[in-house]
Image (cartoon, coloured by chain):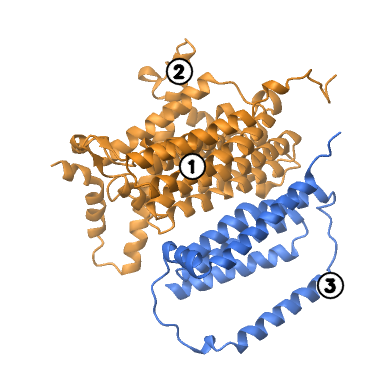
Chain colours: A orange, B blue
Amino acid sequence: MSSALDQIFVHAKHWLLSLFAGAPNWLVQVISSLINIFALLAVFLTLFALISVLERKILARMQNRYGPNRVGPFGLFQPVADGIKMLIKEDIVPARADKVVHFLAPVVLAAVAILTLGVIPYGRNMTAFRIDGGILFFFAAGSATELAVFMAGWASNNKFSMLGAMRAIAQMFSYELPLIIAVLPVVMVVGSLMPDTIVAAQGEYTLGIVPRWFVFTPWGATTFLLFFISGLVESNRTPFDVPEGESEIVAGHMTEYSGFKYATFFMAEYLGMFAVSGLAVTLFLGGWHAPARVLELVPSYIWFFAKLSALLFVYIWLRATLPRTRVDQMMNVAWKFILPMSFTCVIAAAVWHYAGRGLRGWLWSLFVIVVVYSALSILLDTRRKFARRVYRFAE
Amino acid sequence: MNGAAFIVISVFTLAAALAAATLPNLMHAALCLVLALLGLASFFFLLGAEFVGLALVFIYIGAVAVLIVFTILLTRRDSKQHHGVNWSGVLVAFAVFTGLMWALLRTQLLSIVPPHIRALTVKQIGQALMIGYVWPLQCVGLLLTAALIGALVLVKEERR
């Protein structure tokens, strides 16, 4: 019974395909892909609508106010109202803008975000796009984000847009490196770039209760934190929303966008957030595996989305808690702390592997990480060098 | 199916490459170059070499294209002017094309029907790189590290 419930969507797809049993092979392939695409879009656009209202509710709760509560029960129909508002707004394109590139930028950004969602396994046998180098595909597709942001900033022909695009690219490049290197330990330990294999490698349980997710090893926990922070920066979320910086440069590369194009940018940002969180769940939190063997009765996709929602909640929580960081501080952290730490995690994962993957490996990798962390903290400590602050450009 | 896909991708890639070479606006030309590279990557996908295709997208579209775009932005103030035909560029392009065609036509491989082999997995590529070609790989790594350090030295702010 539980396995039937677990595979219900897979069976539904097979049933749909069986309707086209007489069709030629390529047509069946095309239809199969279309079903996958449709399912992905339906699920994640619904999640986007849901999270946009939930985010405002949670932020409101944390800031001690009500939040949206007028449209529908508990304000749940707010996204519908927002959507209608965005659609009927006037679409303004600056007279001196590069019309074609200005139009293409949000399209490319959203397309890239949707592509990256394809390789993540959402449940048992539920990967939309199975490919041998799935992790590589994720980053290859994601790397076009920078180009799309640049297109938006350049085509708008506005200094705020250009500044925002420059900031965005600087920040994305700086944090893409630690993001990719943070994936390396997992890929190394599993020996595969395929998300499904990585999830399968985390499927066992120690003593039947403690799952063997990578987050429960010292290197895994550290890498997960680094990955999460880098992912936060990559998706331009609030402690690191320097590219948008409403109080400094209006809205960065989105300044000259209005109406539905602005909504597309917004959507791409959220889809990117889902993709990075989904990858974090896949790599470190055991993907769609249940946290204990007994709980495997609950379908796998429910576990995946539970973990995803937990991560998204942390995103929102951070947004409500932290102010925006300064650009130079953010870059300093990326190059001087996060990058060396992610290299350390690669070494710690190797130590864990060669010390037998048991308790001994656990302690040794913890030792490596603690040593490097302490060394970095001592080296990067600026308190001893405090001098009178000199302002170069503001007097 | 594959033949049709080949023709579609070829037309797309060639059109994008032609646009990249002829468009008067340099920024548009750079973006068309990205499209042409995307077409090249899809050729690799068509041949079953997923890893090479993905690496092409990752390096050329993710890094090199952004580098080109930034170079144009930071060096040219007249990126919208038309500069006329650059004859030396045409000459170099023609020379490269002739050289490549000459090398291609001389190879024996063209006349042989390729045996049906399964596409390489990433694991096989990794094993080949780390076992058979480990010295070339290390040399390339050293070269890139040297380039990185050199770039850092060049842009380093002088201490006052």
Residue annotated with mark 2:
A68
Residue found at x 42% / y 35% = A221
Tell me the quadrant of the picture where the N terminus of chain B can be found: bottom left
Q: Is residue A55 above or below residue A155?
A: above
Amino acid found under the numbered disc labelled 1:
Cys
**What secondary structure is marked by label 3?**
helix
Amino acid found under the numbered disc labelled 3:
Ser
Is A303 placed left or right of A173 in the picture?
A: left
Q: Can residue A89 be seen from the camera position used here?
A: no
Q: For residue B35, what is the image quadrant?
A: bottom right
Q: Provide residue A295's location: percent of width, then percent of height.
A: 21, 34
Can marks 2 and 3 be said to lie on one chain?
Answer: no
Amino acid found under the numbered disc labelled 2:
Pro
- Mark 2 or 3: in front is 3
Residue found at x 49% / y 30% = A84
Q: Provide residue A241's location: percent of width, then percent of height.
A: 60, 30
> What's the distance in space between the residues labelled 1 and 3, CA to CA?
50 Å
Farthest top residue in view:
A64
Q: Chain of mark 2?
A: A
Is A21 placed left or right of A248 in the picture?
A: left
B139 and A168: which one is in front? B139
Q: Is residue A126 above or below residue A239?
A: below
Can marks 1 and 3 be said to lie on one chain?
Answer: no
Residue found at x 27% / y 47% = A124
> What's the distance in space between the residues labelled 1 and 2, CA to CA?
43 Å
Residue annotated with mark 3:
B88
The disc label shown at residue A345, or none = 1
Q: Can residue A362 be seen from the camera position used here?
A: yes
**What secondary structure is marked by label 2?**
loop
Q: Is residue A330 above or below residue B6?
A: above
